[in-house]
Amino acid sequence: MFEVLHPYDNTLITHPDYIKLALDNGFQRTNDYVGGRCPVCKREMKVRAGHKKDDGHFYHNDSEFCPTKDPASRPYLGKVAAQIDPHAVNLNRKFVRSNIECIWSRLSEIVPYLDLLEFIAILKEARRLNVYGYVGGVPELIPYVFVTLINFLPSKSREQKRKLKFCFFYDSSVKKYEDLWIDKGINSDLVRISYKNSETIRVKIFDMEYQYLSRQKFRLSEKQKNWVLDEV
């Protein structure tokens, strides 16, 4: 991993940033400093020099589970809602249908080169898992559930312009989607990790904000809108 969390705050730092921190704090060996933190599991990560000048990186120095080691093992994946509330289903589906273009726009902001067929695949998976049925759900958080439902592959991107594979993770405090509703997403991080083959290349943290409902940077044609609404 080429970026991790700062030892004492939630900003991302690179390998050179960490080396400078260790030097500034008087450590002769960088791994004697407190260590960066994994953006997902928040555990300490060690540094390792690369083969080239600019490819030093961070790694987990333990055998404990972290979703970044095995993205398919994210604990909330593939989980059907434990309790289905018909009222919640109707409320959440109505929210998605009423705000489908805002949701498409928000996903397009955080998933570069999002293709319409990927969006349809997300909606189909959401319907299969009935993510609309979570009791106590906050409808405004639905886009941040949607992005965890599929992996975003270069071959499926718009015009195949995406160069890396994307997976989205919540921080390790989130074991199931219902955990997001407890603090309405305020204290939970959504992390996008970019992979080349199985190697972590980039990390980006997103706020699970609601302001996307008041902006639409990316739009759907009327034909596209009707197509995706059929999948809600």
Image: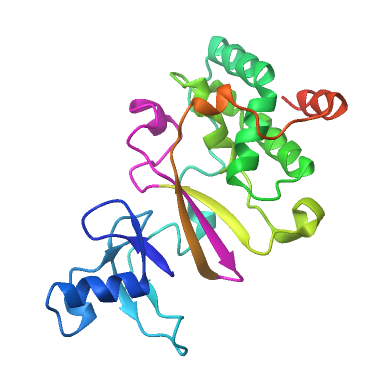
Is residue 145 toward the left or the right of residue 160 in the image? left
Name the residue: 69% across, 57% down: 153
Tell which residue pokes out farthest to the bottom in this image: 51
Against 230, residue 62 (above or below) is: below
Q: Quadrant of residue 196?
A: bottom right
Tell which residue pokes out farthest to the left in this image: 26
Name the residue: 47% across, 21% down: 138
Location of residue 79 in the rendering, given as x and y in whole percent from the top left corner: 53, 38
Could one spot residue 62 in this view of the protein? no
Location of residue 205 in the rendering, given as x and y in whole percent from the top left corner: 44, 49
Q: Which residues lie in the magenta part?
A: 171-198
Quadrant placement of the N terminus: bottom left
Q: Quadrant of residue 105?
A: top right
Q: Nearer the viewer, residue 153 or 2?
A: 2
Location of residue 55 in the rendering, given as x and y in whole percent from the top left corner: 46, 80
Tell which residue pokes out farthest to the right in this image: 223
